[in-house]
Amino acid sequence: MLREFVALTRREYLKLARNPQAIFTSLLLPLLYLLLFGNGFTINAASFVNPEYGPFFTLQEALDFLFRGAPNYYSYFAGGMVGFVAVTASLFLGANVIFDKLFGIFKRTRGTPAPSAAVFGSRLIAGATQPILLSFFVLALALLFGHIPGLHGLDVTATVTPFGLVEVLLAIVLLSGLFATLFLTFGILLDVPQTYFAAVNLINLPVLLTSDALYPWGTMPTWLQNVSQYNPVSLAVNVLREVMFGSSAYPYSPGIYLLGLLGWTVGLVSIAIVLVRRALRPLE
């Protein structure tokens, strides 16, 4: 099985390397979001400070409430873009499987001695690599913008330790693996592109819009804040923001959020394994 897994994984990486247009467009999207959306929308936390009438007496209270401790909206948004990219960059993973089915490529792969675990695992590993790399690209780009006059950038206000970097890495890997597994499973179970995109949009948009990836935390209604606490995107983004901006605005440590994210990932992967085995059983 290991030999087949390595060969199929190598094949997936070669497909990506031989498609520079896809690489360019995947890099262009987060660049546009950071330049246009992040710089175009600003919320001044100082305007929420009114010593006479409230609701906050200090700027730090307003920052904790609105941006979970981030020094400005752009920094808050840049951390959330990591979760956004991890989801959106995984969308076409399942679509590639469906197109391979239409061209007969997937059928020929299943006709080889490679077990279903190797077929699924190779696409999962290769597919999750792209959102992981894009997430770090977003962080690096947001930090770079902070040194360009006239642009907003990511301001890291806390002391980031090596252990904090490991927590950030784990959060990105778990989140990317979670959604890569989800969309890849849809691609294996479904055969029609229109059905696939309808299904992923039904999940993609609600997941992103009920997280705190883009919306300032303090502007959410209470019910949405409660829902957001259990959203896997919020769990991952909370780890990043707590490491970069401090823990004063968070009720739990990054380790607790990582455990919640791990629970989501393990549960979804377990369900995916059962469904994929059933879907690929006839040719084994």
Image: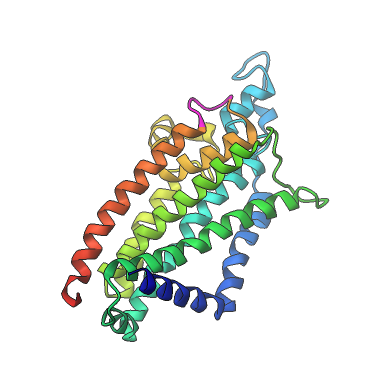
Towards the viewer: 68 or 53: 68
Residue 6 lies in quadrant: bottom left
Q: Could you tell me residue 58's position as x and y percent?
A: 68, 19
Residue 77 lies in quadrant: top right
Q: Could you tell me residue 155's position as x and y percent?
A: 71, 40
Q: Can residue 221 be seen in this view?
A: yes
Residue 249 falls within the magenta-colored stretch: yes
Q: What stretch is highlighted in magenta?
A: 248-253
Residue for point 19% across, 77% down:
283
Towards the viewer: 107 or 61: 107
Q: Is residue 46 above or below residue 57?
A: below
Q: Could you tell me residue 101's position as x and y percent?
A: 31, 80
Q: In this view, does 282 lie above or below 55?
A: below
Q: Could you tell me residue 103's position as x and y percent?
A: 34, 86
Residue 250 falls within the magenta-colored stretch: yes
Left or right: where 206 falls relative to 238? left
Residue for point 60% across, 59% down:
30
Residue at the extreme right: 149
Q: Is residue 140 above or below residue 72?
A: below
Q: Is the magenta stretch mostly helix, strand or loop?
A: loop
Q: In which quarter of the image is the N terminus?
A: bottom left
Left or right: where 215 falls relative to 105? right
